[in-house]
Image: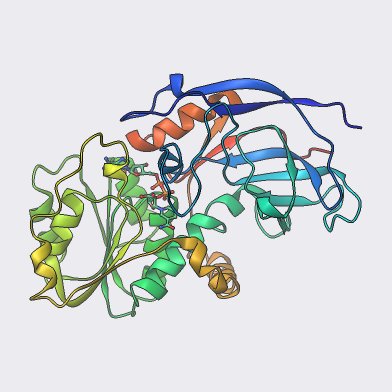
Amino acid sequence: MTNLTGHEIRLRSRPVGMPTAENFEYAKAAVADPKDGEVLVRNIWMSVDPYMRGRMVDRESYVPPFQIGQALQGGAIGQVIAAGKGATLQVGDYVSHMLGWREYAVVGPMAMPQKIDPKLAPIQSFLGALGMPGMTAYAGLFRIASFKPTDTVFVSAASGAVGSVVCQLAKAQGAYVVGSAGSDEKCQWLVKEAGIDHAINYRKEADLDSAVRKAFPKGIDVYFENVGGKHLEAALNSMRVFGRIAMCGMIEQYNNTAPAPGPWNIIMTIPKSLRIEGFVVSNHYDLLPKFYQEMGKLIAEGKMKWQESVTDGLQNAPNAFLGLFKGENFGKALVRIGPDKAV
Ligand code: NDP
């Protein structure tokens, strides 16, 4: 019997428009003992991700909605502190799983546990560049956008968890890469550290379309879409014939309360013979071994860098989440729940 209590963040109410702190509740909860095949994990890191906004809406989607009064869920990294009979993970193991937003998690197969090796990389990177966002970048660029080294590549939200990996994967193969981001600091990092050719601070551009045209005198072959709205319109205008657009996310729309007008120039898809394809990363995990191989090589060669925005304390996780929609995070947004060594 563990007799533990821990804290968790629950959904207090469904947000309308931009979420606020009032939509969340920081609450105490009894911690159950692990049953056969389960393990009890003390969470160390958790991820906040833009897609979680979609799960706050009561509608059918590729993942079920969060329920009011219940703890939220999401990617987390922790250490096993107790194991039920027959569990494959052992006390002391580090594990990534899907029961974030809480201090302690009883993890069974539904939480998709994956043992991670803390000697390979800092454990929190398995929530970022080496985790779901990195995989999203890899699948989106290589499989969905059919990227070739001779392509010119435009990436929106380019300094973020997904975008920064896309930029460097494409750059490592010699492509011409331009990213857009919401501050000079982010743009400088993209050029100086991530090594891309040019970065556009979209907040400073009265005319994003002209800025994108100027950055791509010969046009765009691949647009990696993370934002939507004016970014998509500007990309459509500059796409080259047979260009590909990987529709990864449209964060600009996630808090809309009314339908957003479609891009006025979607008609460009016809004369330019464009292919626009949406994707969800969970359908592409067959690429995981190749992804690890490529990332391992790039990290060893110093060609893959990333930033982390760390918020301390589970009680502050809602603020870290809200910050995603204001561009407050620079790189992967993480919440540190407890010390790295849990046992
Ligand atoms: P980021 O780390 O990029 O964080 C979000 C960033 O988006 C912010 O920092 C901000 O950066 C930018 N942003 C926020 N609001 C706006 C806005 N209104 N207009 C323009 N930019 C905005 O997040 P992720 O890398 O985790 O996710 C990036 C995208 O990928 C999201 O759209 C997400 O939903 C999507 N995604 C899709 C997946 C899939 O399977 N299809 C899986 C994972 C993520 P800035 O300062 O530059 O504005």
Camera-side residue of 290 and 195:
290
Image height check: is 187 above or below 14?
Answer: below
Q: Position of residue 194 (x, y in %)?
A: 40, 58
Horizontally, is 295 left or right of 87 in the view? left
Image height check: is 97 above or below 172?
Answer: above
Horizontally, is 207 left or right of 71 in the view? left
Camera-side residue of 238 and 164:
238
Horizontally, is 155 left or right of 233 in the view? right
**Tag count:** 0
Q: Position of residue 129 (x, y in %)?
A: 52, 56
Image point (80%, 34%), residue name: 32
Using the rendered image of the protein, determine whether residue 262 is visible from the camera's viewpoint.
yes
Camera-side residue of 338 and 18:
18
Q: Position of residue 265 (x, y in %)?
A: 8, 60
| Residue 55 falls in image quadrant | top left
Q: Position of residue 333 (x, y in %)?
A: 49, 41
Image point (13%, 50%), residue name: 208
Horizontally, is 6 left or right of 218 in the view? right
Image height check: is 24 above or below 272?
Answer: above
The colour scheme applied to this rendered structure is rainbow
Image height check: is 230 above or below 9?
Answer: below
Quadrant occupied by the C terminus: top right
Image point (30%, 50%), residue name: 250
